[in-house]
Image: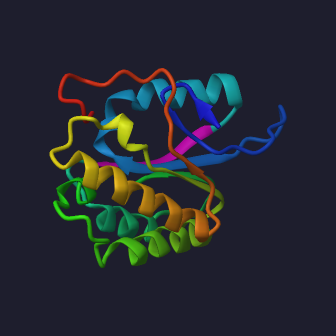
Amino acid sequence: MFLGLTLFCMGAISDWYRQTDPHIQNSIFAEFRNDISQHLRSDHEYDMRYWLSRGWAWETDLAEDLALAPKTDNTAMSPNGNRLMQQDRMVEPTWLQPNAEHICGGLRETSTLGVVFVGDADLSPGVDYGQVYARLSEVYMSVFAQLGVPLVNQAPGIELQDDGIH
């Protein structure tokens, strides 16, 4: 479910039941933290209990962070693509499948409900190796799909910065 400025997968909420939501992802969302938290509280009665945002972290770093995160009801994970966008050959990186498995395992261990956001390549037209990034992003998304984790790959209404990446 797309909510406001970022992606969350939420369950049904009643007036008397408030769930928690950690959001582990890259630094792109950091500037929207207050807006996201306010939107979740006012429109969906969720409190953000945990937030981790690391600039220039690799996907593998975020999987490790997720494994150490506190247990909560819902988790939105957004591996940022920093390592993926550095790939310059059309060969599946050896870290890709294990990383997706670690993320899915972390979601299962730390939350009742989890979702992963991996943006389609059209959300990052400014990467240096565009065709490689597009293909490897598809592979990455298919691994998450095979592992059975809910996956979101579009962000309607998002405007890219001039660099075509953020």
Residue 47 in picture, x, y percent from top left: 60, 38
- The reply to whether residue 80 is in sight is no
69 magenta-colored: no
- Residue 23 vs residue 59: left or right? right
49 magenta-colored: yes
Q: Which residues are magenta?
A: 47-54
- Residue 150 vs residue 160: left or right? right
Between 93 and 150, the one lying in front of the other is 93
Q: Is residue 69 above or below residue 119?
A: below
Residue 101 in picture, x, y percent from top left: 49, 75
Q: Is residue 57 above or below residue 107?
A: above
User: What predominant SS class does the magenta segment belong to?
Assistant: strand
Q: Is residue 80 above or below residue 13?
A: below
- The reply to whether residue 131 is in sight is yes
Between 100 and 51, the one lying in front of the other is 100
Residue 88 in picture, x, y percent from top left: 16, 60
Q: Residue at x 59, y 63 (%)?
A: 145
Figure quadrant of the N terminus: top right
Figure quadrant of the C terminus: top left
Q: Residue at x 28, y 73 (%)?
A: 93
Q: Residue at x 21, y 35 (%)?
A: 126
Q: Residue at x 17, y 57 (%)?
A: 86
